[in-house]
Image (cartoon, helix red, strand yellow):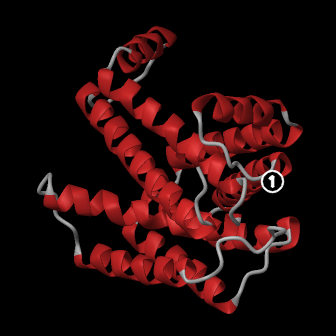
């Protein structure tokens, strides 16, 4: 694995997991959605897309998307796609340290298994 | 409408898996119809974009992925990210199973092992509390 591939893989995984964590931050700021009528939901989305966290999220997810595209243009797909499954573990760490979620041993075990399983399903 | 936390989380998880799986299946169906792409000039790229965005499959795929994003956002307004993210990996199980049983695609032994490991992982995550930061 070249240095360039490693670098873009790290960028892809970090940008995607931190992007989703920023989405979570935006939605936690808005608070629990309790009214599921269309008009109420549209108000929630309008508020979400105006928030700084959501804009950061869109930026990060775009970086993740384009860095994956770049990666796929030169790197070995059968290695790169499975390796991105590590996003689940990185996302778990982000949830613990950035969002203050309490991850029990059972949840960690589940996250690691999902990560391994997704990597296997994504092999060529 | 008042739902229990776990029930409404499960309902949204099912929607997330349905919309993300169908979105990806629709997009890949659309791109298969367009076929292999060789872009050599800006004109080629423009022609490709016109073909992509005039495909019904692609628009249905985009609609499904927008619905996925909406459900993902709504559920994260109360549930843990570390619950939703691994639990929604069920779509990695649904897509190959749909491919296998409805479209006759072959699933390799290694992929079957992966599918089983994901199911065990999702099962473990599902038994934890959907929200650990919520104030009652």
The residue lying at 53 percent from left, 68 percent from top is: B87
Q: Chain of mark 1?
A: A
Q: Is residue B29 above or below residue A72?
A: above
In the image shown, does A41 or A73 lie closer to the viewer?
Answer: A41
In the image shown, does A91 or A99 lie closer to the viewer?
Answer: A99
Give percent across and percent down for residue B125.
Answer: 56, 79
Residue A110 in which image quadrant: bottom right
The residue lying at 80 percent from left, 67 percent from top is: B134
The residue lying at 78 percent from left, 80 percent from top is: A102
Q: Is residue A74 above or below residue B86?
A: above
Q: How many marks?
A: 1
Give percent across and percent down for residue B3.
Answer: 58, 60
> Is residue A69 in view from this perspective?
no
Reading the image, the residue beneath label 1 is A28
Give percent across and percent down for residue B130.
Answer: 65, 72
Q: Is residue B19 above or below residue B75?
A: above
In the image shown, does B3 or A25 lie closer to the viewer?
Answer: B3
In the image, A49: left or right of A81? right
> Is residue A48 in view from this perspective?
yes
The residue lying at 37 percent from left, 77 percent from top is: B114
In the image, B127: left or right of A117? right
Give percent across and percent down for residue B12.
Answer: 52, 55
Disc 1 secondary structure class: helix
In the image, B132: left or right of A12? right
In the image as oriented, which residue stretches furthest toward the left? B104
In the image as oriented, which residue stretches furthest toward the bottom? A105
Crowding at dot 1, Cα within 10 Å, few <14 / some 14-19 / many 20+, comes out as many
In the image as oriented, which residue stretches furthest toward the top? B43
In the image as oriented, which residue stretches furthest toward the front? B1
């Amino acid at each position: 694995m070249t240095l360039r591939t490693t670098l873009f893989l790290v960028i892809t995984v970090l940008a995607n997991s931190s992007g989703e964590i920023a989405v979570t931050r935006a939605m936690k700021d808005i608070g629990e959605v309790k009214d599921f009528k269309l008009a109420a939901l549209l108000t929630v989305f309008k508020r979400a897309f105006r928030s700084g966290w959501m804009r950061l999220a869109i930026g990060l997810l775009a970086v993740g998307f384009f860095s994956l595209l770049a990666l796929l243009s030169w790197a070995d797909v059968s290695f790169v796609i499975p390796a991105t499954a590590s996003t689940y573990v990185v996302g778990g760490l982000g949830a613990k340290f950035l969002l203050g979620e309490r991850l029990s041993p059972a949840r960690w075990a589940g996250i690691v298994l999902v990560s391994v399983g997704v990597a296997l399903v994504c092999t060529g | 409408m008042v739902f229990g936390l776990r029930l409404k989380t499960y309902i949204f998880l099912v929607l997330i898996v349905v919309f993300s799986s169908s979105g990806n299946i629709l997009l890949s169906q659309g791109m298969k119809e367009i076929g292999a792409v060789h872009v050599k000039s800006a004109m080629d790229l423009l022609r490709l974009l016109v073909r992509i965005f005039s495909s019904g499959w692609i628009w249905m795929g985009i609609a499904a992925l927008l619905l996925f994003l909406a459900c993902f956002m709504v559920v994260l307004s109360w549930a843990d990210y570390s619950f939703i993210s691994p639990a929604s990996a069920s779509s990695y199980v649904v897509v190959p199973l749909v491919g296998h049983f409805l479209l006759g695609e072959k699933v390799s032994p290694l992929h079957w092992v992966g599918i089983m490991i994901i199911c065990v992982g999702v099962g473990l995550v599902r038994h934890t509390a959907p929200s650990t930061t919520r104030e009652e």
